[in-house]
Structure formats: C-alpha cells, structure tokens
Image: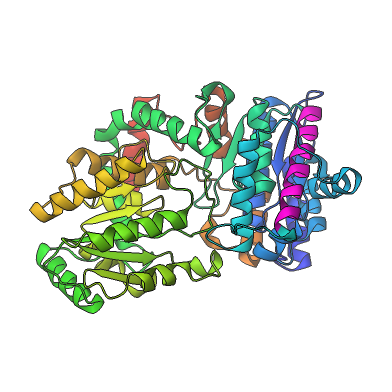
Amino acid sequence: MRLVGGGEQFDRLLSAARAYWGRRPSQPGTCVVAEAMHQDIRVIVRNLMLANAICDLTSARLVVLTGLDREWSRLLCEDFDVARVRRLAEAFGADDIIDVHDLTERRLAREGDAPAAGVEQATLDALEKASLLRLNRVPRLPRTEDERFRARRARARALSAVYERIFSDLSPTALVTSQVDYDQWGLAVDTAMRMDVPVVHVQSTGSLKAYTLFPEARQGTGTFREELTGEIARYFDWHVWPYRDLVRPNAEQVAWRVKTGPGGGGPFEVRTETERRQLREHGCHRLGLGPERPLVTVFNQAVSDAVGTNRELFDDLAEWLEETAAYAVAEESVNWLFLDHPGQDRYDTTGHFASVAAHCSGRSHLAFATSLELSRNMLWSMTDVGVTVRGGVCGELPAFGVPVIQAGWAEWSGCGLTHVAETRDDYWALLGESVADLVKGGPVLGPEQRERARLWLWLSRSGADVSSPVLPHAEMGEGEEYLRALTVGLQHVERDGDPLHCAVRRMWGRREPLLSRFDFRDPAGLAAALTASRSAS
C-alpha cells in the first residue's frame, strides 16, 4: 500500500475505523475473505467496507489476505507496506490476517516446484501466461523461457496450493477482491469458484461498484469474467431494458455528461453535421488520409493487460492487432486509423504498436497514431465504425451512433451494444460486411442498439454505482484529502444510514450480479427515485 498521508492522519483514520466497526457478533466457523494486495488504499478500503457489509449480513467474521509479491511490487508499487495493511485491516475489524506470500515462500522452500492440486492445468496455464506477459510488459511470451519465467510458474503453482489450503480450512461465505486476473488474484478466484464460494469483484472507479458471481448462477462457460458477462446480460435484459422508457431521461442526462464532461481529448462539442464534416476533413488531412473515404478506427488494447481472462478470438492481443492490420492493408476501399492505447508505455516495453505501424507504412489509406494526438471532437467526428476487443469505446461510440465491432468479450458484451464476433471467421465477416456497408453509404446504427448503449452508460455510471456517505469518490485521489474525508465519514455516519448496506442486502438476498443504487423489482419506487433525481438536477 502506498504510504499515503502523514502518520498522524493515518492514525486518526484507524481510530475512526475501530470505533465505526466496534465489536460485532459472529457465528463460529463462518467468515468472509477479503483481499488486500492492491497498492492503492482506496481499493483496499472498498474491499474492507464491502466485506464488512457482508459480514454484518451473514454474522461472519472477517479474514484478510495480504502479502508482498516482489515482482508485482516492482511493477505496480515499490513501497507496498504489509505492516501498514495489517494495521488498516485490524482497524476495520479483521479477526485474522493471512500473509499468503509468506506461506508461498515457505511452501517453495519446503517442497520446491511441486504440482498444484485442484486447479485445472488449462486455468493454471492461462493465469501464468497472463501474469508473465504483464510482469514483463511484453506482447507475447518467448519461445524459450529463461529461469525467471520458470520460477514464476513454480510460484504460481505454490500459490494455488496455498489458496487451496486456506479455502479448505476456512470454508468462507464469500471472497471479496479487487482483481480477478493474474496469478496472485486469479488463483484465489479460481479456488473460490471451484469450492462454490461467491466471488465479489469490487471496482476501482466511481463511488462503489461491484460485480458478484454466485455459484448457482454459473453456466460452466469458463472464467469468472466469461460467466459474469452472461449474468450481466441476463440482468440487463430482465431488469433494466424493460424500464427503458422510465430511465430514458436519466440515461440521456448521463450521455450528455459523457459528451460534454472531462475525458480523454476533451469534451465532444460538435453539434451539427456540417461541423462534423469540417472537423473530419481537417483530421483526415492531418493524418494524410483522403476525407472522401469512410474511416474505420481500430482501438488498440494495452497489449499485456489481462490477456485471456475473458473470451478472446486470438491467441493474444498482439496477434489480433497484427492480423487486423494485415486485413486493413489489403482492404483499400476505406481508410483505416489504428489508435494506440493511451497508457501503453506501462504495458509494453517492446514498441509493438510502432513495429506494426512500420510494417504497414507507405499505404495511403492507413494511419497510425497515439490516442493523445487526437481530441475526442476529432476522433468521434472522423470514425464511422470502431473496432476493438474491449474497452470504454464499446459503450461510448454506440451511444452516439457509431457502431463497434468486438473481437472478444467485456462485461457488457451480452447487452446488445456492439457487434460481438463469436469466432475468427465471424470477426472477418463482420469487418467485411461493415466495409461493404460503409462504401454504400452506411452502416446505420439501429435505434435499439443506440438506446441499449445509453442505458448501459447510465447503468455503469449511475444505476450500478452506489453512493456511500462514508466512502469518498475514487476521483478524490488517495492522498491526505481522501484520508480526512474517509475519517469524517466513519466518525459521523452510522451503518444503518449508509445506502451501501441496503444495496449489499438486496444483491446478496436476490443473488444479483451487481450492486445497484435502485430496486429494479419495485417499479413504483424506481419511478419515484428517478423522478426525484431529475427534479434535483
């Protein structure tokens, strides 16, 4: 955990947390396991708050998993402080704190590279691959692995065995975690899923967002993220889409805030088709593209980010980019803009995007750029079709009339926002159909798809974002101001006055896949809440 705040302010926070949670009854043998291996205090506090809400609901004690993995620490945060995390967890009422990496080191010293029991080899291989890519910040693994790679794989197997023992001994009521990818988080999630333990994935943005996968909801389709995609799609179709007429004014307000509010490249202020055409021509000339041709924008991914943790059509994100670029080279009837991820330097040390650009140089219908080179005004004015694997553009572009093709799944991929390819052949067919439609003067995004995208923006930014008077919003940052605001919340808000506990009770009792600000099974109450929010705004 980063050394945020001075010692005095941190001590005030600990004192307020102890008084807030106090002593509570718990049933013997029941516990909720919360992960505390993230470098950001905001994320750890969110995990502890949500885990404690479940403890209150189920009369369970709180067990916290922490520990220092030196490779992850070097990548994410050099000053992760386990002792500081222990003090924080104890103040938030933890009955037991387990250092999983200390146990892992002991197991490696005792048994060496022993096979891991329980975990499927395919799952282990996938998590090892994702971790190695991310830790080394490379687009793909080398054909011949050196000792560092072999040591990491051995550590993953030992870590899996440690989680197996912990979960077998504890039989927890739930696992609350900030991450579901990579070895030190993903192996805990896999263990929980195999033992039919509900997994709560707390998000790091907004006020408080969380997705939950309950054992009885699983379809046997794959990873946590794959299962969750289907669950969210069902929830959206059953509980959000039927109320679209009621939610529409609020969804339009959220879309306006997305359009005019802060974000990458500034607000989208183009209001007329003439303004869009003028800006489009300027942007195309700037990139060396002919403005008379339609434009397909390919949004590159952070190339080593969580590879293979949801359904993907290609072996890795690098292969997707390379093959899509090869397709674009041969398809000259439209312009192609390849846009790199804004944080790519944190995910790739090899210059993969630049190498693909160099390989495709000299084509008048292709352009490569970083996302920071173009404002949102220019990008949205130029783009006729978006292509990506996952990411925020999947919700934003369709909400403003621009269709998106996905070569993989994200949590919203079953909600009808985008054109989701199910196979590689399907992906190439969707690209071909879109190019053909563009040449003829389309494609036109259907009104239902646009409305679904705006409903998703509303759900993700409002309906499924629970405001808590205790927890500061993520945008406040993680410094002194955050510590002071959290301390004040803990000192002056009682648990029965925090909407978080009502939202957790509703999610847990109904086995729903997400926290919700509103009760979607109470149309009258939903109408009253939404009308009140519109009046207040």
Q: Quadrant of the N terminus?
A: bottom right
Image vertical order of residue 415 relative to residue 292, above or below: above
Q: Residue furthest top?
A: 216
- Asked if the magenta segment contains residue 251, the reply would be no
Image vertical order of residue 517 relative to residue 215, above or below: below
Residue 407 visible at all:
yes
Q: Nearer the viewer, residue 524 or 191?
A: 191
Residue at 14 percent of width and 69 percent of height: 275
Horizontal side of residue 294 vs 362, given as left or right:
left
Horizontal side of residue 25 vs 270, given as left or right:
right
Residue at 56 percent of width and 48 percent of height: 469
Tell me which corner region of the image, top left, top right, bottom left or bottom right, holds residue 250: top left
Image vertical order of residue 65 relative to residue 197, above or below: below
Residue at 52 percent of width and 45 percent of height: 308
Tell me which corner region of the image, top left, top right, bottom left or bottom right, holds residue 170: top right
Q: Nearer the viewer, residue 278 or 332?
A: 332
So how many labels did they put on this image?
0
Tell me which corner region of the image, top left, top right, bottom left or bottom right, holds residue 455: top left
Q: Nearer the viewer, residue 243 or 221?
A: 221
Q: In the rendering, at what x and y percent does residue 149 appear?
A: 70, 56
Q: In the rendering, at what x and y percent does residue 290 appear?
A: 15, 72
Q: Residue furthest front?
A: 144
Give, as a single range, the part of the protein colored magenta. Answer: 149-170
Q: In the rendering, at what x and y percent does residue 177 appear?
A: 64, 43
Dominant secondary structure (helix, strand or loop) of the stretch shown in magenta: helix
Q: In the rendering, at what x and y percent does residue 166 appear?
A: 79, 34
Residue 370 visible at all:
no
Q: Nearer the viewer, residue 231 or 294?
A: 294
